[in-house]
Amino acid sequence: MTGPECRPATIVHDLRLSWSATRADAVSALAWSPDGTRLAVGSLGGDAAIFSADGAGKQETDPHHEGVLSLAWSGGGRWLAIGGQSSSACVWSPGAGSTPIPVRGWVNDLAWAPRSDRLAVAAGNDVVVVRPDASVVADYPFLEGTVNALAWSGGGRHLVVATLGAVHWFDPVVAGRRAARTAKVVGAALSLAPSPDATRLAGGQLNGNLGVWDEATGRGTVVTSYDGGVERLSWRYDGRQLAVAAYGELDVWMLDAKGTAVGAPFCLAETDATLGGLAFHPSRPLLAGGGRDGWLQVWEPGTGDDPLASLEVGEEITTLAWLPGADALALGTCSGAVHVVTLG
């Protein structure tokens, strides 16, 4: 490949362990607060804890009946949304504790609107938008099949919902439950990722299709089709690359301003195991991935096929998250271990 993307690789000598902690059950979700001072950790045992960035402090939240499936901090870091199994969802804050959110199914995803106190909750076939006090702003019940993913697009103008056979764009400000826009897909829509500049939305499907929609026009393009479901997506901080984890493959695509693929993707890894975590660095062209084989790897896509850094954890990595404003990663494992590592 030629052009500005072809440059010497960033030198990363190693991944150093900063601190570790242990939970009683597998770590199922991680979320750093926007200011990087706190790390929320959820487990399949139903507990969620807040660690200080250096690991020295810890605060337990109210316990849940079943496993925690998703965590999301509000934009200012004032509230933490927690969702899980057994129709369990709440908004937690250090001073006020937990405020329950009534839902009717497993909470598969949570998403705060940008620069707003509106929280979208996907529970079973329903989506509800609430304030931190659990008052309802909008609700969209009985959608087609399980809601697998949520995303706020267009800078928060639309709430995008991935479900069976369709991707819906709702406008929670407008009264009524009819979608402002709907894109039909084959099978189930699994994953959603708005571009950093809010102009495009990437979506992955169970049948292997990877699509990109233009937010202004609503027009979509199928970039490619994989052999298995597209489960994880991550945009580079400047929107110039899109990482895609489908079963057995990890690719990075270059896209132009219209969302059209430019050339063939970088194939970073081929594996018979799915990735537990995939995320671009918040401000550098570095991509981290960790999976069932127990390896955490960091690449700079476009500068070579080999990882810049690797760390063998020794057990399945279930999730990972970059620390905002720093070259550090949190990762969780199937045994309940939480590790924070820094790039050397």
Image (tube, rainbow, N blue to C red):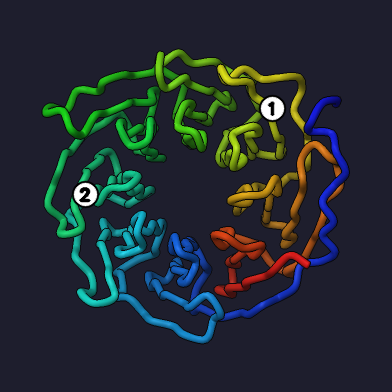
Residue at the (69%, 68%) spot, across then down: 342
Q: Position of residue 63 (x, y in %)?
A: 31, 75
Query: Which of marks 2 and 1 precedes in the sequence?
Result: 2
Q: Which of label 1 and label 2 is nearer to you?
A: 1
Q: Position of residue 4 (x, y in %)?
A: 79, 30
Query: Which residue matches tag 2?
Result: 104
Q: Quadrant of residue 226?
A: top right
Q: How many marks?
A: 2
Residue 246 visible, this orientation: no
Amino acid type indicated by mark 1: Met
Amino acid type indicated by mark 2: Arg
From what the image shows, is residue 233 above or below residue 44? above
Please give the label number shown on residue 254.
1
Q: Observer-nearest residue: 9 or 245?
A: 9
Q: Position of residue 249 (x, y in %)?
A: 72, 38
Residue at the (66%, 62%) spot, across then down: 327
Q: CA distance from mark 1 to mark 2?
A: 40 Å
